Image (tube, coloured by chain):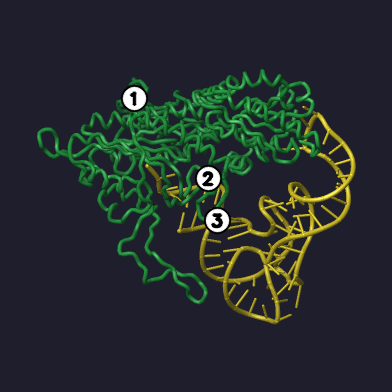
RNA sequence: CGGGGAGUGGCGCAGCCUGGUAGCGCACCUGUUUUGGGUACAGGGGGUCGCAGGUUCAAAUCCUGUCUCCCCGACCA
């Protein structure tokens, strides 16, 4: 039976257009008129705030403190780390003047107000934070330094997509300095684990954590680790990265200290971040043809009450009934926090309001009309299970007190169900039985949503690596990462036939 | 940055080729009707056509420049 969906387009028809329509229809964000910059609307920003709150707790529990560094970085700071500046030079926004003047009614940049030294709008803060580390660090007693900041950064990308790659984006960037390589590597991996757990547990977004190949490293890093999520079209999304920077930045920026013997030593540093890109990941992990499905832990509202108002005097009594239920629900605890409830009092047809909450992806929607209040009931809609088998909307009437008691469990069920669904999809779409390049080519030609392929490889460097990258590129493929928990391969290198060093995941990527 | 497409009331579009100062659907407002599932009818408000310049008696329509968005490519912690 043909069922009408809330979105104008389905994932099957056109995944990219579907993604755009979720963002529009769920009121997550919109274009701003400035290239690659978006306005985040309350529902979209509310999800980001939840991500911030919950991740911030974990960052602090892991021993870091928050602080804030300036948006502008003197151009000269970038000159110090050669690889780093090479990596970012092509995408930096630069401030060169500090004043406008009126020229025949038009505002123009005042050429007399040129800055002595141009200021870069930070694309990331290693350089400015490194300069601070150099000041802060004198003695071995000052280590480790473990800080984090929540900030916006700007990268002038050629091609932008809402949430996935915007010119300006919001993120957290952690920066640490340690006395030993061992400690710094441990920190890098601790954060990788933190990101991976956060993604699975809070976002319900399954990921593969592992090390990026050399060619995908952060500019200036000795090692880059990532969590890679699989979108519903089978493409990979690099959802978070953790970098071991070795002594590259500390040597370039003179981040050093005197050890117990009085000798000068350079510190070992790390940096790591996740961004608003996570929201793009959540959309493409949990969204369906009726819009977004927000995992309860990050839903700004977990239960939305839609009263069936009729613009008549009896509305007052209905609203009072709903307000009481909202009050009672708000006293419930779920995931260790107070339940978040919204009573949607906006005038308008209940059915319109319901579909708007469906599209936004509120986990539980309660529709409450006169018949419900008379029977002390509520009508419950689960966003993760909208339809019955016959294609009709699945609504279930419950006593309101029963619902209030059951709500925390229902929300936990939804959280787990979304995660499990996505986890199964991830696992089902990693192929490890492809053994030749021709097969690989055929595989991605045949399957629209092919997912990833796991192969053994010899991990060459230099031109050997370059060749592999080029061959993969011809199929629009990239190496994602080497899964942390992968075994040692007992088969030859997929690309060269030499002895293999490790397994690596290959896929198309955002 | 290269190739393609597009910018017309809040949204989606027609008009542009063959210049003559805007039209449709949805949304919105008012009224009536209806109402446990995205009600129906009637009436109404709102735009000078992305921006700038040019051609012309006259420009949404032609020309030039520019900005933004979408798709493909290159690029991409």
Of the residues under marks 1 and 2, which one precedes in the sequence? 2
Q: Is mark 3 on a helix, strand or loop?
A: loop
Q: Distance between the residues labelled 2 and 3?
A: 13 Å
- Rounded to the nearest angstrom, the CA distance separating label 1 from label 3 is 52 Å
Question: Which mark is drawn over residue A162?
Answer: 2
Closer-to-camera residue (A490/A399): A399
Q: Identify the chain of the residue marked 1, using the numbered disc in the image.
A: A
**Residue that numbered label 1 is attached to:** A492
Residue A414: x, y in percent?
58, 24
Q: Where is residue A14 in the image (x, y as percent from the top left)?
A: 61, 40
The image quadrant that residue A242 belongs to is: top left
* One can see residue A447 in this view: no
Question: Where residue A395 appears, x then y in whole percent?
Answer: 72, 24
Residue drawn 34% across the image and 39% down it? A217
Q: Which of marks 1 and 2 is in front?
A: 2
Q: Distance between the residues labelled 1 and 2?
A: 41 Å
């Amino acid at each position: 039976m043909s069922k009408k969906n809330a979105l104008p387009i389905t994932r099957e028809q056109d995944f990219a257009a579907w993604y755009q329509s979720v963002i529009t229809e769920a009121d997550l964000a919109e274009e701003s008129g400035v290239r690659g910059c978006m306005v985040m609307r309350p529902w979209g920003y509310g999800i980001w705030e939840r991500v911030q709150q919950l991740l911030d707790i974990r960052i602090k529990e892991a021993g870091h403190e928050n602080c804030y560094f300036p948006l502008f970085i003197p151009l000269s700071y970038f000159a110090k780390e050669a690889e780093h500046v090479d990596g970012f030079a092509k995408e930096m926004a630069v401030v060169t003047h500090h004043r406008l003047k009126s020229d025949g009614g038009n505002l123009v940049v005042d050429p007399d107000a040129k800055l002595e030294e141009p200021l870069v709008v930070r694309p990331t803060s290693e350089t400015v934070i490194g300069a601070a580390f150099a000041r802060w660090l004198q003695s071995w007693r000052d280590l480790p330094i473990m800080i984090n900041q929540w900030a916006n950064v700007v990268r002038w990308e050629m091609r932008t997509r809402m949430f996935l790659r915007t010119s300006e984006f919001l993120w957290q960037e952690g920066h640490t300095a340690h006395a030993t390589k061992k400690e710094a590597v441990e920190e890098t991996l601790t954060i990788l684990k933190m990101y991976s757990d956060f993604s699975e547990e809070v976002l319900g977004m399954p990921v593969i954590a592992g090390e990026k190949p050399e060619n995908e490293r952060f500019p200036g890093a000795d090692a880059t680790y990532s969590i890679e999520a699989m979108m519903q079209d089978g493409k990979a999304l690099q959802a978070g990265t953790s970098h071991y920077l070795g002594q590259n930045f500390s040597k370039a920026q003179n981040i050093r200290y005197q050890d117990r013997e009085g000798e000068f030593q350079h510190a070992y540093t790390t940096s790591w971040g996740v961004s608003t890109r996570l929201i793009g990941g959540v959309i493409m992990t949990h969204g369906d043809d009726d819009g977004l499905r927000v995992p309860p832990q990050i839903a700004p509202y977990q239960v939305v009450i839609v009263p069936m108002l009729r613009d008549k005097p009896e509305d007052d009594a209905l609203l009072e009934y709903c307000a009481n239920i909202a009050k009672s629900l708000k006293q419930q605890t779920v995931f260790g926090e107070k339940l978040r409830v919204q009573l949607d009092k906006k005038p308008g047809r209940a059915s319109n309001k319901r579909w708007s909450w469906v599209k936004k992806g509120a986990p539980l929607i309660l529709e409450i009309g006169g018949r419900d209040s008379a029977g002390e009931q509520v009508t419950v809609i689960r966003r993760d299970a909208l339809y019955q088998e016959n294609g009709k909307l699945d609504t279930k009437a419950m006593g309101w007190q029963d619902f209030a008691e059951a709500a925390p469990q229902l929300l936990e069920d939804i959280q787990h169900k979304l995660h499990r669904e996505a986890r199964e999809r991830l696992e089902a779409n990693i192929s490890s039985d492809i053994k030749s390049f021709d097969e690989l080519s055929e595989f991605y030609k045949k399957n629209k949503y092919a997912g990833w392929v796991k192969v053994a490889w010899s991990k060459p460097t230099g031109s050997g690596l370059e060749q592999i990258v080029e061959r993969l590129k011809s199929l629009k493929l990239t190496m994602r990462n080497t899964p942390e928990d992968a075994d040692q391969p007992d088969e030859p290198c997929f690309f060269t036939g030499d002895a293999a060093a490790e397994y690596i995941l290959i896929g198309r990527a955002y």
